Image (cartoon, rainbow, N blue to C red):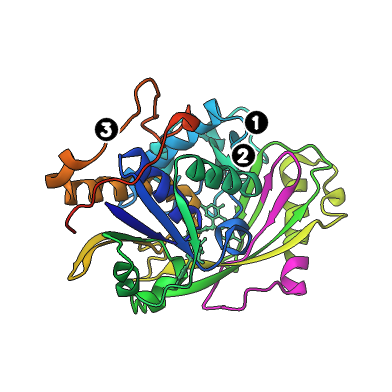
Amino acid sequence: MKIGVIGTGVIGLSSAVALRRRGFTDVTVYFRDDLPATTSSRAGAVFTPFDAGSHAEWIAGSLRAFREMARTQPHSGVCIGTAHEYLPGDAPIPAWTGIVGGVHVWEHAATPPSPTAHGFDIDVPMMDMRVYLAWLKTLALELGVRFVQRDIGSFDEVFASGTDAIVNCAGLGARELCLDRAMRPMRGQLLHVPNALGLTDAIAAPEADGDVTYVYPFPDYIVLGGTYELDESRCETDDASLARILLRSRRLLSAHTNRNADALGETILRRVAGLRPTRVINGCHECVRLELERSPAGPIIHNYGHGRAGVTLSWGCANAVAKLLHAETDANAALREPRVSAGHTLSDAYGTTSLGAITPRPGPRVQG
Ligand SMILES: Cc1cc2nc3c(=O)[nH]c(=O)nc-3n(C[C@H](O)[C@H](O)[C@H](O)COP(=O)(O)OP(=O)(O)OC[C@H]3O[C@@H](n4cnc5c(N)ncnc54)[C@H](O)[C@@H]3O)c2cc1C
């Protein structure tokens, strides 16, 4: 069965790997923008769920995958780090912390950052996107996924080239491909600065104007953020926003640890802007569309609209896509190749280890 995945952001790459893991042998990723130009390359990225209700299963699935990567794949750019999360006023501890577990609320902790601060500490996955996406693409290539740069004008165009099923991970591109007017850009701006202070923990605090100030440290740099500018579609930074981010980050670091905060960002490595693929319905900004559409030409599984949480939800959603397509084509399962080559293991969480030994070859065609 020939599967065409549209998009090489974190959602498309994870979906392609998950499909291979579930036994789909012929997977091609079509993309307009390659890695450095995607939104995904510009993400923070710390595990930050927003909607614990409808996203609970995806959050749990992603958490399992990232924890396993952190444990077994030292070069993946994924690690588990401590995040210190401030909350506004007397806001409740967010429900997603219950899925992650191990939350330490400051009121009950031995050493809160300040007597008046309200928040919590939690250990979460942290993804160095400069390393992680390159690692993920290599993983996909090793699994035999093909990559074709092509601007897709319509799903019919992909079916016409012999594809049996499409997985639509086009992010903001879904606005045109699916005429989905709920898709709206949300610009995010951030700075990369050297990690001269040797920071290890993430810190995040909401601001009164709706932005969130965050300091996400990685071995080679620190991400300072950020802005949440709905309907701003210019993918460029502005100096005033970046100056505000730097000021707020220094203030946050100073309030939190009193460490040499003024030295933060003395040198700027990179100024970054990205457009989050936000799907806004009834005030919800991460109204992810993950569903099967049975078009006359063949099945299309939509997986887009992850807004502020695409990295966080990526593996949960990718595994859900693979399960959906598997169920859809179950009648033909006997035609498929065995899921795992003899002697090689594929992890349940995200499908890696001993990858070089998997020999991809075209699978038998299945009626769509
Ligand atoms: C500044 C910033 C900070 C962020 N921080 C975090 C964070 O800390 N944690 C977190 O979980 N998330 C974070 N996010 C959100 C996260 O980056 C996004 O949710 C995620 O990257 C969306 O991934 P995607 O694959 O859907 O989209 P993209 O990365 O935009 O990929 C879309 C792909 O589809 C392709 N495409 C689109 N249309 C077509 C077409 N017609 N033909 C061919 N190809 C097409 C594009 O070329 C691209 O390859 C952040 C985002 C920003 C901007």
Residue position marked by numbered label 1 in the rendering? 111
| Mark-to-mark CA distance, 3 and 2 | 30 Å
On the rendered structure, is 181 left or right of 136?
A: left
Q: Residue at x 56, y 62 (%)?
A: 39
Residue 353 appears in the picture as rendered: no
The residue nearer to you, when weighing 155 against 161, is 161
- Residue placed under numbered mark 2 in the picture: 77
Q: Position of residue 350 (x, y in %)?
A: 41, 37
Three-letter code for the amino acid on which mark 1 is drawn: Thr
Provide the secondary structure element on which disc 2 rests.
loop
Q: In the image, which residues are magenta?
A: 215-243
Single out the residue that lies furthest toward the top.
Answer: 343
Question: What's the residue type where badge 3 is placed?
Answer: Pro
Is 285 left, or right, of 301 in this rendering? right
| Kind of residue indicated by mark 2 | Gly
Callout 1 environment at 10 Å: few (<14), some (14 to 19), or many (20+)?
few
The earlier-in-sequence mark between 1 and 2 is 2
Marks 3/2 in contact by CB < 8 Å: the verdict is no
Q: Which residue position is annotated with label 3?
A: 338
Q: Position of residue 83 (x, y in %)?
A: 59, 40
Relative side of 288 to 195, left or right: left
